[in-house]
């Protein structure tokens, strides 16, 4: 082949090769190494000892891991069933015609996302305190009763983490919905009104269908993100009380960096990767993300 | 030259990619800045990793003094890296695996030390300090938390003696004797006090597993129990453990002890500020890091005393926390770092400097009788002579035996213990359950 023609053939590959090299270096290689480590017993130094599927066998019999999976599933369900609809409703409110101070509200809802997690943890630890906390004080003020041990009682600790997730991420997701709402033609609402549709019906028959691509994107992102939740339980409860708020990502962190069981942690990481991957694929298929109508 | 097919191109790209990946790995295996001739004198820069600014101050000052000394072999510069205690060990292990970039000296927090006991990490990276401490071995207070297979790999930086802090003004106001003899008597007084004023004389933690178990361990050691014995056998399932947990659970139920998610966090500070918490069992460092930091306005109102005994026996003091300083072995600066550690931690001058710079209690028994320490008065504690309390405490404090699986035990114990503290489970059941869970988890 003449050299000019050969160069032309190679040129596209040369242009795209940096991406694939970096992709291989920073994604495929770590995944491969993680997969290999999951089949070994390794403390981080020296030669990993091949143990086959032992780590996986032990993992599925480990009560702590199963507890972490259950907690994570609860967090995911809460995020999808509560946080996403809450974000949509707030966006709907912010999109109302004639709303004054819209930018102020947007800023207010977005602030939790940019606040340092450390500050959030400090403030919320105090909010949730049984004796001096804001929440119990409010409950006492309004209802004359407020002795909830938010962070010390296992079931309330889960609720506390979920409320923090709600507070932290709802505003962020609202921005996506608001952008989607802005793109819905006004004519559709006008046509619906002419047909006699009220606000609820317009919302159900115009807003929701038109927002489907945004909702799908948000739902999938939230599912995958929450399945890897680490910061909120780590900072608020450190997985406690006991293991009541332990998430899978925290479990992996704990095994790797407090017990130095890197092979075992890698096995948990592989399991989490597989679960998140299939959740993502299933959600994509269910919501039709990326598909033309 | 033949045509380049897509397959050929991908193969070649793969080779280039593989080369790129292999280069840093091979370079790491080949060694780097950590290799070279040993520095035996002259200028030396010690890479020093710690989680606590107090240690940076201490070692920097100590290095300066040694450099200025007329017969000093080394002219030290301390390059300090400060980070979270867990992160420091993670980074040390990663750098150890890479073969370069490890520190010359590192402070390893006692609760993190089990990590270096795992997989031979400590033995591979850290210098065995047995020969260094041989001349003063019998004078050292704590070596067991930083020993692996009988060899010492880090020097304790602070004896971390647990004593009872109490508000002298509140005790007087409520007619509480300052010299109550036993925990059982104090618990009765505390229950009456709580009923009358809502105040408490101590805390238990209900948050994460480490916090929950720390308060328990402190009292368990005092009572004469422990988690592991010297040979590494689990000894948790003991009458002492059940007794201590029962004592704590009853204390929470009566209000004598205040349940808080975090014994060092904002709610604890609020309890101190509101005079709701007027006593606490805490180590010596709580004075500076707990009280002086959070309630400076209560200066002069707090005092310390040795712990009331348990009626069933035990000690008058306990331990909680600690940081062991280790030297990385087979590095050019190993000798210089060892000398710095020795002069800072194994001499009276070094121990006095540590106490003055960071409030760290001596780790040599003999210094608890030394006039320079005995005369120390603490302004925050109303001018109290500290060693009137710490000297007898040092003579009757328990031994804590470290174990590579300590974190597994903490995970196993946290949940059942919390249930016992909340009155949902009998203490004996909780201890039994925790022991069974540990035995099942330790193989993981």
Image (cartoon, rainbow, N blue to C red):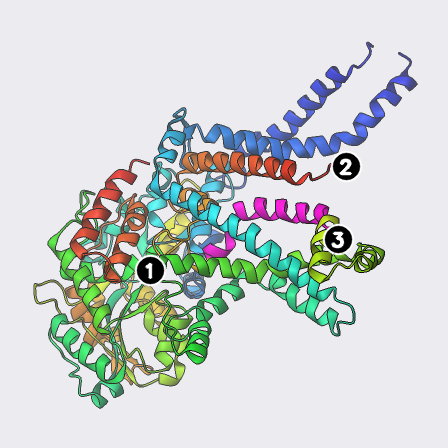
Q: Give the mark nearer the N terminus: 2 vs 3.
A: 3
Relative depth, front residue between B293 and A173: A173
Do the residues at discs 3 and 1 belong to one chain? no
Is residue A222 on the magenta stretch? yes
Task: Estimate how packed mark 3 is, as few (under 14), some (14 to 19) or many (20 or more) residues with alpha carbons within 10 Å.
Answer: some
Q: Which residue does the numbered mark 2 point to in the structure image? A: A292
Looking at the image, residue B192 sits to the left or right of residue A270; the answer is left
- Between the C-alphas of marks 1 and 2, the distance is 53 Å
Do the residues at discs 1 and 2 belong to one chain? no
Q: Which residue does the numbered mark 3 point to in the structure image? A: A206
Label 1 near label 3: C-beta < 8 Å?
no
Which quarter of the figure is the N terminus of chain B placed in?
Answer: top right
Which quarter of the figure is the C terminus of chain B placed in?
Answer: top left
Please tell me whether mark 3 or mark 1 is closer to you in this view: 3
Give the x, y percent position of residue B393.
18, 68
- Residue B413 visible from this viewpoint: yes
Secondary structure under the numbered disc 3 in the rendered image = helix
Specify start and end residues of the magenta stretch as a single range. Answer: A211-234
Residue located 15% across and 68% down the image: B316
Prevalent SS, magenta region: helix
Do the residues at discs 2 and 3 belong to one chain? yes
Give the x, y percent position of residue B78.
48, 58
- Between the C-alphas of marks 3 and 1, the distance is 52 Å
Give the x, y percent position of residue A218.
65, 49
| Furthest-bottom residue in this view | B173
Give the x, y percent position of residue B150.
23, 43
Secondary structure under the numbered disc 2 in the rendered image = loop
Secondary structure under the numbered disc 1 in the rendered image = helix
Q: Which residue does the numbered mark 1 point to in the structure image? A: B211
Looking at the image, residue A69 sits to the left or right of residue A290; the answer is left
Is residue A125 on the magenta stretch? no
């Amino acid at each position: 082949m003449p050299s000019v023609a050969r160069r032309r053939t190679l040129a596209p590959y040369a242009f795209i090769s940096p991406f694939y090299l970096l992709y291989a270096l920073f994604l495929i290689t770590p995944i491969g190494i993680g997969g290999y480590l999951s089949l070994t017993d390794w403390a981080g130094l020296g030669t990993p000892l091949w143990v086959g599927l032992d780590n996986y066998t032990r993992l599925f019999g480990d009560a702590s891991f199963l507890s972490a999976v259950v907690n994570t599933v609860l967090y995911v369900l809460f995020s999808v069933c509560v946080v996403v609809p809450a974000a949509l409703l707030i966006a709907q409110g912010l999109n109302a015609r004639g709303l004054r101070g819209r930018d102020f509200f947007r800023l207010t809802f977005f602030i939790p996302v940019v606040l340092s997690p450390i500050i959030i943890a400090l403030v919320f630890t105090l909010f949730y305190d049984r004796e001096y906390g804001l929440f119990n004080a409010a409950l006492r003020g309004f209802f004359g009763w407020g002795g909830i041990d938010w962070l010390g009682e296992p079931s309330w600790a889960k609720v506390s983490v979920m409320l923090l997730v709600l507070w932290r991420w709802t505003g962020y997701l609202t921005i996506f919905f608001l952008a989607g709402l802005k793109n819905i033609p006004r004519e559709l609402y006008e046509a619906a009104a002419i047909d006699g549709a009220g606000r609820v019906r317009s919302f159900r028959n115009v807003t929701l269908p038109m927002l489907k691509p945004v909702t799908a994107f948000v739902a999938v992102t939230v599912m995958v993100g929450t399945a890897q939740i680490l910061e909120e339980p780590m900072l608020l409860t450190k997985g406690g009380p006991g293991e009541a708020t332990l998430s899978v990502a925290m479990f992996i962190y704990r095994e790797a960096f407090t017990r130095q069981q890197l092979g075992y942690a890698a096995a948990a990481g592989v399991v989490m990767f597989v679960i998140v991957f299939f959740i993502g694929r299933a959600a994509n298929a269910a919501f039709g993300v990326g598909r033309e109508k | 030259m033949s045509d380049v097919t897509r397959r050929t191109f991908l193969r070649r790209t793969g080779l280039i990619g593989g080369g790129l990946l292999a280069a840093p790995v091979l370079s790491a295996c080949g060694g780097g800045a950590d290799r070279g001739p040993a520095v035996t004198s002259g200028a030396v820069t010690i890479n020093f990793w710690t989680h606590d600014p107090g240690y940076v101050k201490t070692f920097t000052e100590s290095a300066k003094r040694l450099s200025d000394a007329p017969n000093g072999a080394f002219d030290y510069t301390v390059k300090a890296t400060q980070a979270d205690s867990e992160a420091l060990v993670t980074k040390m292990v990663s750098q150890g695996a890479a073969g370069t970039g490890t520190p010359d000296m590192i402070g390893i927090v006692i609760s993190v030390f089990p990590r270096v006991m795992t997989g031979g990490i400590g033995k591979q990276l850290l210098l065995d300090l047995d020969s260094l401490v041989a001349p003063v071995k019998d004078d050292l207070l704590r070596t067991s938390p930083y020993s692996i297979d009988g060899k010492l790999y880090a020097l304790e930086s602070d004896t971390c003696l647990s004593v009872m802090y109490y508000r002298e003004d509140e005790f007087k106001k409520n007619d509480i004797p300052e010299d109550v003899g036993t925990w059982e008597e104090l618990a009765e007084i505390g229950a009456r006090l709580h009923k009358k004023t809502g105040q408490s004389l101590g805390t238990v933690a209900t948050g994460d597993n480490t916090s929950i178990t720390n308060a328990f361990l402190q009292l368990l050691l005092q009572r004469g129990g422990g988690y592991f014995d010297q040979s590494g056998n689990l000894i948790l399932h003991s009458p002492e453990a059940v007794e201590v947990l029962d004592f704590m659970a009853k204390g929470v139920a009566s209000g004598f002890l205040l349940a808080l998610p975090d014994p060092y966090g904002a709610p604890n500070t609020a309890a101190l500020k509101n005079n709701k918490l007027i006593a606490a069992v805490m180590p010596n460092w709580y004075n500076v890091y707990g009280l002086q930091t959070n309630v400076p306005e209560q200066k002069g109102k707090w005092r310390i005393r040795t712990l009331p005994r348990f009626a069933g026996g035990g000690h008058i003091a306990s331990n909680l926390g600690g940081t062991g300083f280790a030297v990385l072995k087979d590095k050019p600066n190993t000798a210089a770092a060892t000398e710095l550690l020795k002069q800072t931690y194994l001499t009276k001058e070094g121990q006095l400097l540590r106490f003055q710079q960071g409030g760290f209690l001596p780790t040599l028994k003999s210094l608890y009788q030394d006039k320079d320490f005995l005369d120390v008065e603490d302004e925050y504690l109303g001018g109290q002579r500290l060693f009137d309390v710490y000297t007898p405490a040092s003579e009757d404090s328990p031994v804590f035996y470290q174990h590579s699986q300590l974190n597994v035990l903490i995970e196993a114990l946290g949940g059942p213990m919390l249930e016992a503290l909340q009155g949902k489970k009998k203490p004996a059941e909780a201890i039994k359950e925790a022991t069974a869970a540990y035995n099942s988890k330790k193989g993981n």
